[in-house]
Image (cartoon, rainbow, N blue to C red):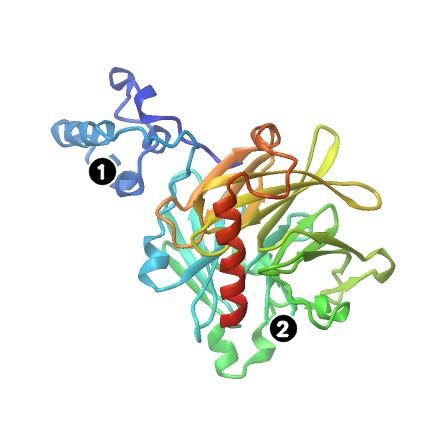
Amino acid sequence: MYYVAPPVKEVIIKEIDYEDFDFSKMGVTFEYTNLLEIKEVKDKYSKLKEKIEKITSIEVPKDPKPYMRIPYINIKKDGYTVQSITEIDGKMLISAYKRKHYSRLYIYNIDTYSYEGKIILDNKAHVGGISFDHTNDILYITGSNGEINSYDYKIIRELNNEKNYTINFSDRVENEEEDQLEIKINNNINVKNLDKYAEASTIYYYNNRLYVATFNPTGKGYLYSYKVNYNKENKSISIIDEHTKKYKIGARVQGIALTNYGNKDYLVCSQSIGIANSSILIYEITEDDLVFVGRTYINDHGLEGIAIDDDNNLVGIFENNPRPIIVLSMKELLDEVSSSLLDVSPGNELSSYLGGVVYRLLH
């Protein structure tokens, strides 16, 4: 479950137990979330009191939406650009890429917002989508040329037991030690098998199906739904072709997530490009088709990957944005959406389309 910090003004300083209090619950920005440091000086009351006064002097943001405080400082320092997000074992994994460099996953603790380590992948893909099969411990990540790579997360879990660790799989590729890449799972998931012009942009694993979306900067995109079968004995993934489905979705889709809410299955899409305000599209998934429910827009740009937690909260990540994480409940989203496919702001709709035209020309 993703924890949303309450506004700072709700904290009553007199009730704080300096010995045991979890400062992350105060909605502290990342500059003040070094809990170990705070605990080490807990016996020095004057210094601790100074920290408390500094923390509680922070004003509540004017934006009413609750943003989680994951520090991008590690990613920005490395010169990488964030793309997608998923949750595993109470950890938040953020995919990121950098041109001509191996792509990465950055790992953060959800409760403390602290950086724990990174995984250097074995490819230089855009990594626009990541998702996790909790039943089989398989981590799916979009790769190159329309493919979706899959990894055995049990192996990763065994390796990440140190503070600020780095797991590097690119070295094995550089040294042509392919036999040591036992973390990789054999699979044949590639949207180009169905459409030679398609390329996997983002993904989501839901109810034994892998959903793969394409990105079209100016026109309709597509969503492919694969029935997935995992063979543990030979560690391979196959697709049951007769259960593969294809749907039309909106343009400029950057992230997708699926959930069941009110006994209905929903597809949620993040939609953004350039500096235009981002949007969220919602579809109901019926037996035969996707039914458009509505659209709402976010007063911010660069919304990329999204995920939905066990409490039906949507968690979204922004590309190169000072406020990296947004958390919105499904109830809130369904209450806000408009049934129009067009943005409520004509200027934003136009700038989004023009941004798509520029994107197409540059790529």
Q: Amino acid at mark 1?
A: Glu
Looking at the picture, how far across and down is residue 333, in whole percent?
58, 33
Front residue of this view, candidates 225 and 338: 338
Front residue of this view, candidates 106 and 155: 106
Q: Residue at x 64, y 58 (%)?
A: 219
The residue at which mark 1 appears reads as 40
Give SS at disc 1: helix
Q: Is residue 85 visible?
A: no
Q: Is residue 294 visible?
A: yes
Give SS at disc 2: loop
Looking at the picture, how far across and down is residue 87, in whole percent?
54, 46
Looking at the picture, how far across and down is residue 253, in whole percent?
59, 53
- The image shows residue 360, relative to residue 116, as above or below, that is below
Q: Residue at x 27, y 26 (%)?
A: 19
Check disc 2: other Cα within 10 Å, few if <14, some if 14-19, many if 20+.
some
Looking at the picture, how far across and down is residue 304, in whole percent?
51, 52
Please give left or right for residue 262 compared with residue 70 in the image. right
Could you tell me how far apart the alpha carbons at marks 2 and 1 are, in whole angstroms? 50 Å
Looking at the rendered structure, the number of numbered marks drawn on it comes to 2
- Give the residue furthest to the left: 46
Q: Residue at x 39, y 42 (%)?
A: 113
Mark toward the start of the polypeptide (2 vs 1): 1
The residue at which mark 2 appears reads as 145
- Give the residue furthest to the bottom: 176
